[in-house]
Amino acid sequence: MKRIVSCVLLVLLVVGHGKTYARLQGKAKLDSFLFCLPQQKEDSHKVRMLLAISENYYPISDDSAFRYTQMGVDLAAKLNWKLGMGMGLTQLGNRYQAKGDSVKAIDNFQKAQKILLAIADRKRLAVVNLSLGSFYLDFANFPLALENFDKAIHLFEELGDKMGIAVCSQNAADACRAQSNYPRGLEYALRALKTFEEIGDKDGIAGSLIVSGEIYYFQKDFAKALENYTRAMKISEDIGSKRYIVGSANCIGNYYSDRGEAVSALEYFKKGLKIAEEMGDIRSIIVFTSCMGNAYTTMRNFELALRYFQQSLQGSEEIGDPMGTALTLGNMGEVYLLMIDSSHIPASRPLSGANRDLFNKGISYLERSMKISKEIGDLGNIQNNYQRFTQAYKLVGNYKLALENEEQARIIKDSIFSQENTKKIVQQGMKYEFEKKEALAKAEQDKKNALAAKELQKQKLVRNGFIGGFAIVLLFAGTFFTQRNKIKAGKKQSDELLLNILPAEVAEELKAKGSADAKLIEQVTVLFTDFKGFTQLSEKLSPKELVAEINDCFSAFDHIMHKYGVEKIKTIGDAYMAAGGLPTPNNTHAADVVKAAIDIQEYMQQHKLKKEAAGQLFFEIRIGVHTGPVVAGIVGIKKFQYDIWGDTVNTASRMESSGEIGKVNISGTTYELVKNKFACTYRGKIAAKGKGDIDMYFVS
């Protein structure tokens, strides 16, 4: 059975962040606000009061919360108070999201973002990015969710807001977990846990333990997972946090369910379901009904299992939860296949009667589940479904299809549970434990130092005869601190220069150990550009004009690469090379690079029009893109640079030289990764120098 946890975590981490901020801001009691409201003049204070009333109403009455938010937005608009409008629209987006109106939710979030960007209010802008990330996480758009959480984290770091950093990191961890990017997910989860521990927020600690426990679980570190779940449950019960009792019950129940201990699992599922019903938590109710379906499947009570799965499926579809829908469809498909009476399957393997109907239903549900899982990029469920297809086709003797699905399951599994990922998970856990012990040791030492200082204060200081010496010490200290500040400034400058040359991850490795290891990265998308007739054009321009023209173009390209998170590798004369998916691999590299290529294409078209209008010479460009494995590392020991090698680089270069002016030419390999995101025109098999015939496509 596929574990159903995402929806519970979503409701805990997404819906919960608003309440966290309400608590953080120290808002007055609802009754006090309502009492003061009639006497308040129509000014910015009243807008704040209306929004505060809405936040405090939210856990009690959605309708009242919505009404007061709308009143706050309307008054802010009447006063033309931009900050109030930004705050109110953010809150209104949250209210619409709670109502399930995704169109109005995103519309309000984007309006708020535009206003807050215009007035440069970083604090509220961070909250909008957090809300947008939560929105995309809610609707399984994990790359956009992570992008907004990272923006919010960056802003909260600038503001020194630890609560904001922790909440965003916790949500980002869940987005990574949903994409099966466990090392990065654990990094976020442990950062959230550490930050919540620093500020003493037990509610946040419980939530972070649940998320990190899930990541350990999916990496098959079951002991560590259960340890985190149990800690979360104890903390939640101690502080009376119902939402995290619900989350812990879900995870512990799944732990027992996966081990075939259905009775123990049902005990936790029923406990969680009861509390979810008391809270009116629709998402958690949906999750627990699906979990109970899993438990009854383990007990071979297929009738009850299907009944609970059907309830969960209906709920997931009603609230528009694609991940929950896909997971439940997969579980239902598995139940129908388990119901087939294998004792009545003849040796020749064709199914008949009831068994044939069950098989067809099972395959139909699995196909629906697989379609949705591929659309949202849920690798875990994709792998699970491939395994189910394998067993289904073995059952009917179709070993060719069984083998094909088994191979696909293996490929997905290898990408999720790679040795490198496991190593990173262990390293992250060890780093967190070490830092925690170090922090405890430091706290103990600080305590001893404080006691020693207090004791010294009781003693009378002998000052006579030491004033002159003390002045000398002060002079020495002043010199020392001046020099130290100069060293710090120099170090900061050198660090900035290093980051301008190397990716941050590689720069940190180089600073830490004096070298950086070359790495094989399994899938990277490489971009090459080249200017048409560069040599001829360079003869018609002065050296100053030529350098200025190249600088304008390449500077624009650099901004485009930064926009899409693509790493610039180098320029060679008039050629520009960049790559997505390194030094940290990701699942969006192909789409990111193609987007960057399209932006370059559009920039060069506009640049050409501008130059033509001024009667000046201009460059035209060819762009080529290819995806495959590369080796990445630092070249040389003096004037070193980060570079990549491999056949993928050569093929990407051939994509550029085999392309046409003003067009983005991609290989068949890249096309398979982006065909659902961009309109492409097949060119056929094109001969590429030294590569033979390659399938090529133009991106429209």
Image: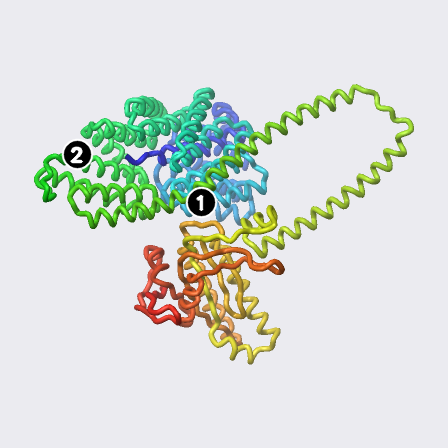
Q: Mark 1–mark 2 contact, CB under 8 Å? A: no
Q: Amino acid at mark 2?
A: Met
* Crowd band around label 1 with a 10 angstrom C-alpha radius: few (<14), some (14–19), many (20+): few
Q: Position of residue 144 (x, y in %)?
A: 42, 47
In percent of width and height, residue 686 lies at 33, 70
User: Which element is circle 2 on?
Assistant: loop
Q: Is residue 292 left or right of residue 398?
A: right
| Location of residue 222 (image quadrant) | top left
Q: Mark 1: which amino acid? A: Glu
Query: Where's the C terminus, which quadrant?
Result: bottom left
Residue, disc 1: 420
Label 1: which secondary element: helix
Coloration mode: rainbow
Residue furthest right as drawn: 465
Which residue is label 2 attached to?
339
Q: How many marks?
A: 2
> 613 left or right of 341?
right
Tell me if residue 74 can be seen: no
**Location of residue 182 in the rendering, given as x and y in whole percent from the top left corner:** 42, 41
In the image, 653 versus 662, the foreground residue is 653
